[in-house]
Image: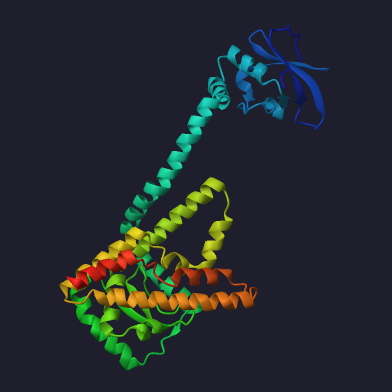
Amino acid sequence: MPSMLALRHSEVQIEGDFYSGSTSRRQQARLSLAEGQLALKTETDAWLLDWESVTVMPRVGNTPRYIHLPDDGVFETTDNDGVDQLARQFKRGTGARMLHRLENNLGLILVAVVVAGLTIAGTFVYGVPVASRVIAEWMPQSIVEQLGQATLDTLDSGWMEPSELGSDRQAELKAHFETYLASASPVPVDINFRSSPAIGANAMALPNGTIIFTDDMVNLAQSDDELKAVLAHELGHVVHNHGMKGVVHSSLTLWLIVIMTGDLSSFADSTVAGPAVLMNLVYSRDMEREADQFALTSMQQQGIDPANFSRIMRRMSASHEHDDEVDDRASQEDEDSSDDSWLSDLGALVSSHPMTEERLRMFDEAAAQ
């Protein structure tokens, strides 16, 4: 600190506490303006300080204000108005004073809340979907392949087992699909079969073009053309890159929530479930309708009866409703039988595509024509 000097009183007198920085002892002090400089006086000492040598912390409501002095000294005071008045003498602190006035203006606070709410809503409703589409389209193919394989590995490690269908039956189905895929699919597609009593009758598309049929789905079909109709819908997800868009959308949404709340626990929970949680049926209604339209158009172009899709989908929905009733009874008998909560969540996600009569009616009407 500068050496002690004789001080003259000024109009600005700020009472507070002084900490020298060399000890934790608190000293009552007074800060004022003297001969164009800051005058700091304690019971035993007095100093003159240049304004440029101190740092005044911004005003936050009526909380105590800190003025950092040379040599680690600190002056603390609750006289915020006095500090602002002192700062005006040196033509400093305009931004802080303006911020303080804004903080205490109820009208501006309400406007800021409304603007912030609209901005957040717009970001989630419009910004995130647009950004997801752009990022997904520019995603390197190597990343898409890694994500698809990671998802398949996650499913195989927790939910799926090798298919119990005979090799001849699998080859027969792939041959039946080959003609359709040759003309309908602009991207490579890999058909896989898996056994999964936990998931039941289902089919799913991964970002890298892998399409999985469960054994229950194959057994549920009354004809191979019904399975081809399901393939057409899943191919729509692949062609329109819905899987990658869904992953990017989920990630962006999650990170925005983490940024706004500062809570990393939700992100940690999602990473435990693995890529499968993000991949299976995170599609929006618009994505499902887009996949439906692709399926209907391609089926009509190849002379496949659209009613095949609505028939097997209604049958699949009925089978899952029955499975849900059985699961509900089992859970009531033993609510604490499993601690793998994320597996239960995954089962709910992949149990079935959210089918509605409105969507299926489109296929029925096309079949009637």
Name the residue: 36% across, 54% down. 132
Q: Quadrant of the C terminus?
A: bottom left
Q: Can you see residue 141?
A: no
Location of residue 280 in the rendering, given as x and y in whole percent from the top left corner:
42, 68
106 vs 185: above or below: above
Q: Is residue 8 left or right of residue 156?
A: right
Location of residue 288 in the rendering, given as x and y in whole percent from the top left corner:
33, 63
Q: Quadrant of the N terminus?
A: top right
Q: Can you see residue 81?
A: yes
Location of residue 325 in the rendering, given as x and y in whole percent from the top left corner:
51, 76
Name the residue: 78% across, 19% down. 29
* Nearer the observer, 165 or 36: 165
* Nearer the observer, 310 or 23: 310
- Quadrant of residue 196 within the rendered picture: bottom left
* Nearer the observer, 231 or 354: 354
Q: Is residue 85 left or right of residue 182?
A: right
